[in-house]
Image (tube, grey):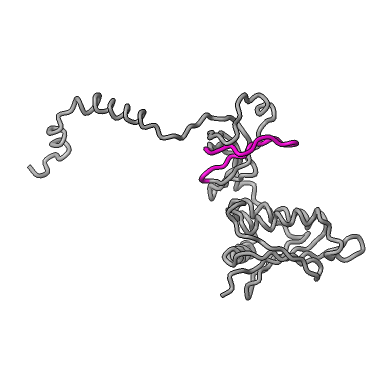
Amino acid sequence: MKTTGYIEIRISGFKGNLELTPENYDVKELGILLKDAEDLLFPSESRGDRPIVSYNVEQGSVRHRFTTSLHFIIGLNAVIAEVQNKQSIDFMHTRAATAVESIQRIAKERDYAFTISTSLEQSSSLRIDADTNYHRTETEWVDAEFYFYGTVTNAGGKDKANIHVSTVDHGTLRVETPKAYLEQFTENMLYRSYGVRAVGRQNLQTGEIDTTSLRFVEMIDYQPKYDEAYLKSLRDKAMTAWIGEIDPEQWLRDVRGGYGS
């Protein structure tokens, strides 16, 4: 039984007077497409959890093929069919929608035509060209404030400074952070647990967070450790302040009311 499949992104157009081919397709354009293809296939997967993807380019204008687990190919095929049906990408996961917007932008800038399909029989097919307009509806997204808790795995950046926070619920998040804040931070934050207050965009319909829009507000000291001594002190306090003032028999009668009497 076959366990892998592929998506094909076919690009047609011209480089000046020359028809687009693998020989004149620039490596910079390829780098952008590789990221877009990964985000289409694995919009909700962390980079470390996704399966292996192999790549091949073929003639026929430029045909990029990305082979991976059949499970993800089937899922993407269903998403393509839904985009065709709705003529909208508002329902898509943020990463996948951003990838479509990236392809749409290139199509308009370079007058390319992209056709996205899969290896499945009777595959769905999506065409994106200079005349299409696949963009998310801005009214679907609003500014919101979030609190994330996790481990800081990276901090800094040459152009746009940011911190990377590894969380249980959202994977690793990149939060744009002022350089001035990182410069004045007096202790080593790497591999320590913190709470991070951030602002960003959230979908009104689905509640999904646009993780590409996150901006830092403040760092919160957060130590998620189990403190047995502290919990015991709370139990002892409750025993003295609450249970010590209660007649257990009377309390039980009050709870039962007239039942059983």
Image label count: 0
Examine the residues drawn in magenta and state their main secondary structure. strand
Residue 109 % position (x, y): 81, 54
Q: Quadrant of the C terminus?
A: top left
The residue nearer to you, when weighing 38 against 200, is 38
Q: Nearer the viewer, residue 185 or 254?
A: 185
Residue situated furthest left in the rendering: 261
Q: Is residue 228 left or right of residue 13?
A: left
The quadrant of the picture occupied by the N terminus is: bottom right
- Residue at 63 percent of width and 62 percent of height: 83
The residue depicted at 48 percent of the width and 32 percent of the height is 223
* Residue 105 located left or right of residue 76: right
Magenta stretch: residue 57 in it? no
Extreme residue toward the right, this view: 17
Say which residue appears at 57% left-offset and 38% top-offset. Answer: 144
Residue 85 in view, yes or no: no
Residue at horizontal 61%, vertical 44%? 211
Tell me where residue 48 appears, x and y as whole percent.
Answer: 60, 52
Residue 164 lies in the magenta-colored region? yes
Q: Which residue is more in the foreground, 90 or 94?
A: 94
**Is residue 17 positioned above or below 204 on the image?**
below
* Magenta region, residue range: 149-169
Q: Position of residue 72 (x, y in %)?
A: 59, 63
- Residue 16's image quarter? bottom right
Q: Position of residue 7 (x, y in %)?
A: 67, 66
- Is residue 151 visible in the rendered image? The answer is yes
